[in-house]
Structures are given as C-alpha cells and as structure tokens.
Amino acid sequence: MREIEKAIQVLKVRADFTADINLDAQMAYKFAIQALQEKLVREYPKPLTLEELKNMDGEPVYIVRGLHLPCENDEWWAIIHTFQNCEFAHFISHGKKFSADFEDYGVRWLAFRHKPEHIGEATNMVEGE
C-alpha cells in the first residue's frame, strides 16, 4: 500500500471518530481525504477500460505503447477518434495520424485520462490482472 493510501485510511478513521464531536474537524478531514484521493488518481491513474476508451471519441488520452515488448515504451498525448463497429482506435498527435488495434489493447498499448507520474506501476495495472 502506498503512503498516500495509508494517509487516506487514517483520515477516514479520524473523520468517523470526530463525527459526533466536532463538525468543523469532520469537514476538514473530508476535504483532506478528497484532495488526497484526487492526487492518488492523478499520480497513479488506472488505464482506461476498453469500453471507456471507445466512448472517448474526440477527447485527449495519454498513450503508452510498447508494453511487454523488448523496445522501450513510447508515450504521448493524442486525440482519439473511434467509430462504431471499428476494430481500431484512430489518433491524431503532433499533426500525424495513426491507428492501433483494439485487440492489442492492454497487451501492446494502454490509454489513460491523465499522464501517469509513475509509468512502470501504471502499466502493470492492465485490465483483468
């Protein structure tokens, strides 16, 4: 468990303990918990599920390519374009267009809503593991 997750747990216990004693303290704990949870999501985002990805047409995603391959990971921001009944995701990044097979999602590439600060840990959280 990460330190930030431990801190969230401690704050939740303290918030429950102060619920009947001090409403101001309880609200402060709730705000602190919310801020830490948002930080956790930004720093250690989970990869989008394939369903989430397919529903993000026209939105920015952070792509990590090269998973489980002998080459280094490629990473970049792109705008995703999806089409109904299509087996590929289409991206535009830095004025270039490219495609990726949905069948390879989670094996050769992943997409995130936010750039993972700790890419190694994030790419180990592939759907179904």
Image: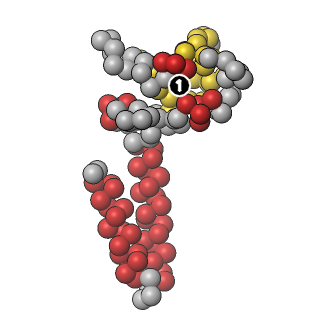
Numbered circles on residues, count: 1
In this rendering, the answer to whether 20 lies above or below 67 is below
Rendered view: 12 above or below 115: below
**Residue at x 48% of width, y 83% of height:** 23
The residue furthest right is 84
Instruction: Kindly indicate the quadrant of the structure image that contains residue 107.
Output: top left
Q: Position of residue 43 (x, y in %)?
A: 40, 43
Estimate how packed mark 1 is, as few (under 14), some (14 to 19) or many (20 or more) residues with alpha carbons within 10 Å. Answer: some
Residue 10 percent coordinates (x, y)? 32, 67
Q: Secondary structure at mark 1?
A: strand
Which residue lies at the image location 44% right of the left edge and 34% below the top edge? 127
Most extreme residue toward the bottom is 21
Q: Coloring scheme of the render? A: secondary structure
Height in image: 129 above or below 102? below
Q: Is residue 62 left or right of residue 4?
A: right
Classify residue 51 as left or right of residue 2: right
Residue ID for mark 1: 77
Would residue 37 be visible to someone looking at this image?
yes
* Position of residue 104 measured from the top left corner of the image (x, y, whole percent): 48, 18
Q: Quadrant of residue 46?
A: top left
What residue sits 37% from the left and 35% below the top? 129
Q: Which one is nearer the viewer's eye here, 125 or 5?
A: 125
The answer to whether residue 90 is left or right of residue 49 is right
Q: Quadrant of residue 17?
A: bottom left
Q: Is residue 76 visible?
A: no
Amino acid type at mark 1: Trp
Q: Position of residue 1 (x, y in %)?
A: 27, 51
Residue visible at 72% across and 23% down? 84
